[in-house]
Amino acid sequence: MHVKQRSSMVLAGAVMLAWTGLAGAQEAALDLSTPAQTYAQRAMPMMLAANDSMVTTETSSNIVKPTQEAFEPSLFSGSNAHLALGLSTIAAAVLTAATAPGEGCEQNCPPPSQLPPRETNGTHAKLAKATVALAAATIATGLIYHWNDFHLEDGLTDPDNLHVLLGVTGAALMAYAVNKSANSATPVSHAGIAEMGALGMAVAIKITW
């Protein structure tokens, strides 16, 4: 009886040992990956997480943020100076016309011997010279800052071309009228030419403003 129990215990121990060996063999059979594959499997989630972080950073850096304030051109620019000089020329021309001495002999004047000495240095003459100087400055700034706006191939009906043509012609007419009057010892008809020149410059400003 004692021998039988002992045999049963030995048999049970052998069965457990065999079962343990089979379990270990199955686990060993299932784990066929090499150490490099095992390392790669462990490192893959970390690499994916790092790539996601890099993509997010690059995407956020490529986003163009809208500007806080809209661009506003400076008030002190060549184009604004050209406009201001043009308007000043027209204002000076109006003042020149308003201060004309009223000699009353633009046409059909009496003989020079019957006329009083002509004033050539009064307010009217000074304003006329100032008007011509302003007109010259207007033309100069226009040539400097708007030269690329003038294209003959666009034709004379192009607003920029008309602006240049009328502005230069108007300034030339006013300069001619002032020079004609300043170099004459007797009253000479010049008001019509000067007014036509001022009108031409006014229209030139209106076309592009």
Image (cartoon, rainbow, N blue to C red):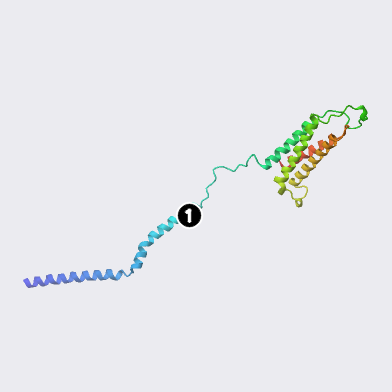
Task: Say whether residue 18 is left or right of residue 75.
Answer: left
Q: Which residue is depicted at the point 43% across and 56% down?
A: 52
| Label 1 secondary element | helix
The quarter of the displayed image where residue 145 is located: top right
In-front residue for pair 55/108: 108
For label 1, count other residues whose C-alpha is less than 10 Å away and answer few (under 14), some (14-19) or many (20+): few
Task: Say whether residue 207 is left or right of residue 185.
Answer: left
Give the residue type at disc 1.
Answer: Glu
x%, y% of residue 179? Answer: 83, 37
x%, y% of residue 94? Answer: 77, 32
Q: Which residue is depicted at the point 78% across and 45% down?
A: 165
- Say which residue label 1 marks: 58
The quarter of the displayed image where residue 48 is located: bottom left
Task: Say whether residue 154 is left or right of residue 116.
Answer: left
In-front residue for pair 178/52: 178
Is residue 202 among what the camera can see? no
| The furthest residue to the left | 1
x%, y% of residue 43? Answer: 37, 62
Q: Which residue is depicted at the point 73% across and 36% down?
A: 87
x%, y% of residue 170? Answer: 79, 40
Picture quarter with the N terminus: bottom left
